[in-house]
Image: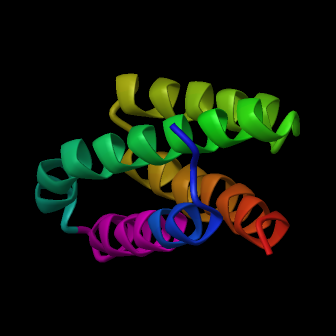
Amino acid sequence: MIINMSILRSKIEETIQIIDNNTDLFYQNKIDEGYKHLDNTLIKISDTIEEVIKYQSQCGKDIQGESIVGILTEAMKALENKDALLLADILQYELKEVLEEVKSELL
């Protein structure tokens, strides 16, 4: 299946918006509500990263693959430690930044 760049760009934009919404809940100290939304956020992140990887394999480009894996590992550690603010920081300032870079590489 060929991955369309504009569709992938849209998926990345949607994922960034979902990250913003979820991290806002954590930053507003709405921790329980943030965790309720986290499952959907992680599913969206996973789906988007899967599409990025498919795109990479089609184009022969390495678009931040290792960075994404490292960031997700950090996020999982924060989740295991129930550190909502660290998790929010990782999603907001690390993963979102990488997704923005990937999106810009798709232009």
Residue 56: image x %, image y %? 75, 37
Q: Quadrant of the C terminus?
A: bottom right
Q: Is residue 48 left or right of residue 67?
A: left
Q: Is residue 78 left or right of residue 56?
A: left
Q: Is residue 87 left or right of residue 66?
A: left
Residue 23 located within the stretch drawn in magenta:
yes
Q: Is residue 88 left or right of residue 18?
A: right
Q: Residue at x 34, y 50 (%)?
A: 44
Taking depth in this image into account, of 63 and 60 the one nearest to the observer is 60
15 is higher (above) or lower (below) than 49: below
Residue 91: image x %, image y %? 53, 54
Q: Residue at x 39, y 66 (%)?
A: 23
Magenta-tinted stretch: 12-29
Q: Main secondary structure of the magenta part?
A: helix
Q: Residue at x 21, y 42 (%)?
A: 39
Q: Quadrant of residue 98?
A: bottom right
Residue 17 located within the stretch drawn in magenta:
yes
Residue 86: image x %, image y %? 52, 48
Residue 51: image x %, image y %? 53, 42
Q: Residue at x 57, y 33 (%)?
A: 72
Taking depth in this image into account, of 5 and 88 the one nearest to the observer is 5
Q: Quadrant of residue 61?
A: top right
63 is higher (above) or lower (below) than 91: above
Q: Quadrant of residue 30?
A: bottom left
Taking depth in this image into account, of 106 and 71 the one nearest to the observer is 106
Q: How is the image coloured?
A: rainbow
Task: Determine the residue located farthest toward the right in the rendered image.
Answer: 61
Q: How many marks can you see?
A: 0
82 is higher (above) or lower (below) than 28: above
